[in-house]
Image: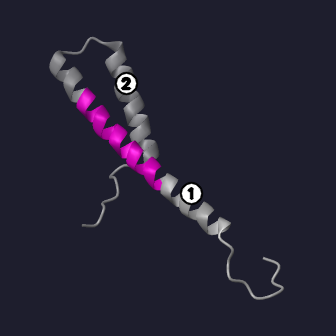
């Protein structure tokens, strides 16, 4: 099964999550509104985590590639 890319960019999800937290902290919401916001916040946090996990994997792969001695012709400077 192919992994789907999140529908929001990391920045979009992070910004919306910040807004959700701000609204929850401000109070004045009904229980139902608070629960709906909480659930949205959980989904947004999961999207952010997915993006961050992908970034960590890309960095780890790049660092591993850099650490491995590449097969280079004799005398090649790089």
Give yes or no for residue 61 being in the magenta stretch: no
In the figure, 74 relative to 44: above or below?
below
Q: Name the residue tied to disc 2.
A: 21
- Mark 2 crowdedness (10 Å alpha carbons): few <14, some 14-19, many ≥20: few
| SS for callout 2 | helix
Q: Position of residue 3 (x, y in %)?
A: 30, 62
Name, please, the residue furthest toward the top.
28
Camera-side residue: 18 or 70? 70
Q: Position of residue 60 (x, y in %)?
A: 55, 58
* Magenta range: 38-54
Residue drawn where x is 34% and y is 28% of the image: 20
Q: Is residue 25 left or right of residue 74?
A: left
- Mark 1 crowdedness (10 Å alpha carbons): few <14, some 14-19, many ≥20: few
Q: Earlier in the sequence, mark 1 or mark 2?
A: 2
Q: Position of residue 41 (x, y in %)?
A: 31, 32
| SS for callout 1 | helix
Our reading of the magenta stretch's main secondary structure is helix
Residue drawn where x is 23% and y is 15% of the image: 29
Q: Which image quadrant is residue 43 in?
A: top left
* Pointer 1 with pointer 2, Cβ within 8 A: no
């Amino acid at each position: 099964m192919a992994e789907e890319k999140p529908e929001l960019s990391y920045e979009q999800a992070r910004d919306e999550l910040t807004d959700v937290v701000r609204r929850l902290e401000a109070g004045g919401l009904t229980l139902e509104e608070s629960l709906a916001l909480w659930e949205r916040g959980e989904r947004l946090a999961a999207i952010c985590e997915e993006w961050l996990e992908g970034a960590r994997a890309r960095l780890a792969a790049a660092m591993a590639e850099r650490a491995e001695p590449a097969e280079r012709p004799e005398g090649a400077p790089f």
